[in-house]
Amino acid sequence: MIHGELESALERRAPGAWELYRKTAETRELDLAAAERGEAWRREEGWAARWWDHGMRFASASDPARLLSAISLAGRLPAAEEPPPPLPKREVHREPDVAPVAPPPELFEPLAQLVSEKSRGEAVLSSLTIRRGRSVEEIRNAAGLFVRMESSLLDGVARALGRRGPRACERRALFRWDTEPELSALAGRLADGATLPLAPRGAPFARGGWLLDPAVAAAMLAAIAPLFSAETLPRWVKRGELASRRVTIADDASADAPCDGEGTTTRRVLAVEAGALGARFQDLRSARRAAAHPTGHGVRPSYRTPPAPGPRRLFFETAGGVAPLELLAGVARGIFARALTAPVAVDLEADRYSVEFTGVVIVGGRAAEPVAGTRVSGRVSEFLGRIAGVATDRQFFPMPYPVGAPTLLVERVNFE
């Protein structure tokens, strides 16, 4: 009954207009501290069905038998009228690796050493959770599509504690590595995040250049990313002048998976090209409503929810960038934002943003004293339009999909 009974039930309800999704995932996790160690091994399986029967219907469950029952129940619920989109027909078959997931690497000691070095002994690594996992996804539909694809991950969260006299601060940093672990960059984020808030004062001036660390720039990009899949754009958006001409933003998850969560082929899409708003991210349903072609951006955050349009691997292009030190040298007076102290706040409809961070004062192109809680707020349109420099040091961060950003230079911002 693994697939046949489910497919037959869906075909009876929605001839030629259904899809069936299955995901299995296995992860191994290490929780490490100076004197503690914990291990976990998890396995998850999820099933989902989507079909069009006088409107789109969706059901999910943890096994095929429960999904069959959920399909029956969902079929009795009212649904808004919606014709089915054209379903992808291309057949792809990839045999997943059946080898067990390897344990995560033992990285507490080397990371702790780097955190201590980069903070000059003022911060210690307090805990490290690192996870290695693999998932296998299968997509079948009424048009004859069968996709089976595998993805892997190595990610986690680290915490560091900074102390200066009676004052202390904890920093939490998420990480995701696509290749070898990048401990130096992670240690730098932890050390700065745990010690810079202990600086004796905030911004010494009210206006200047704003240098954004890759982690801060990635958080900003993730916050404005809903623009690229919105069916209706905010009134302030000018398609031809969304950002500075130095800004090109792409989404390309082809290295991660050949297809999206609906079976549409993954491809590179330019969301912003030389400052101009580019293509919108489309899934099957949004593409049908817009009379456009799907772009391979049907995203499934979980098997429990239907796919929806969204980014998959979003990043700033850096081919025309410069070295980070060159950006630093060009700042006469400003602040280098090294670590966030609160989530980025963005209201895209109102064209507003607010960022709270700690960092380092820049005077005459050189780093000077550290600064504690500092805030920049303003219009999203001005932030994008005032990006004056893009560096070549792009890094990727989980948000939760991979978001890549380099060091950015933004001109003429107000510090609070």
Image: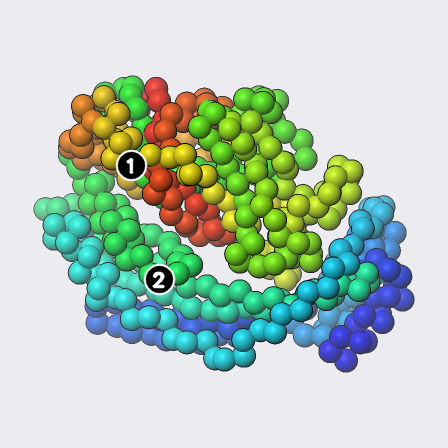
Report if the CB atoms under discs 2 and 1 are less than 8 Å apart. no
Q: Residue at x 30, y 41 (%)?
A: 339
How many neighbours does mark 2 have within 10 angstroms: few (below 14), some (14-19), or many (20 or more)? few
Quarter in which the C terminus is drawn: top left
Between 222 and 170, the residue placed more toward the observer is 222
Between 149 and 220, the residue placed more toward the observer is 149
Location of residue 57 in the rendering, given as x and y in whole percent from the top left corner: 78, 56
The circle drawn on residue 297 is: none
Disc on the earlier residue, 2 or 1:
2
Q: Which residue is mark 2?
A: 180
Q: In the rendered view, tell whether residue 393 sits above or below residue 50.
A: above
Q: Which residue is mark 1?
A: 324
Hey, which quadrant is residue 95 in on the image?
Answer: bottom right
Instruction: Say whether residue 299 is left or right of residue 164.
Output: right
Hey, which quadrant is residue 156 in on the image?
Answer: bottom left
Circle 2: residue type: Glu
Q: Residue at x 54, y 48 (%)?
A: 252
How many neighbours does mark 1 have within 10 angstroms: few (below 14), some (14-19), or many (20 or more)? some
Q: In the rendered view, tell whether residue 58 sits above or below residue 385.
A: below
* Residue, far front: 320
Between 350 and 359, the residue placed more toward the observer is 359
Location of residue 15 in the rendering, given as x and y in whole percent from the top left corner: 89, 61
Callout 1: SS: helix
Location of residue 128 in the rendering, given as x and y in whole percent from the top left corner: 30, 63
Quarter in which the N terminus is drawn: bottom right
Instruction: Say whether residue 63 is left or right of residue 272.
Output: right
Separation of residues labelled 2 and 1 (CA atoms): 22 Å
Q: Residue at x 34, y 43 (%)?
A: 393
**Residue 243 visible (yes or no):** yes
Instruction: Say whether residue 343 is left or right of residue 167.
Output: right
**Residue 169 visible (yes or no):** no
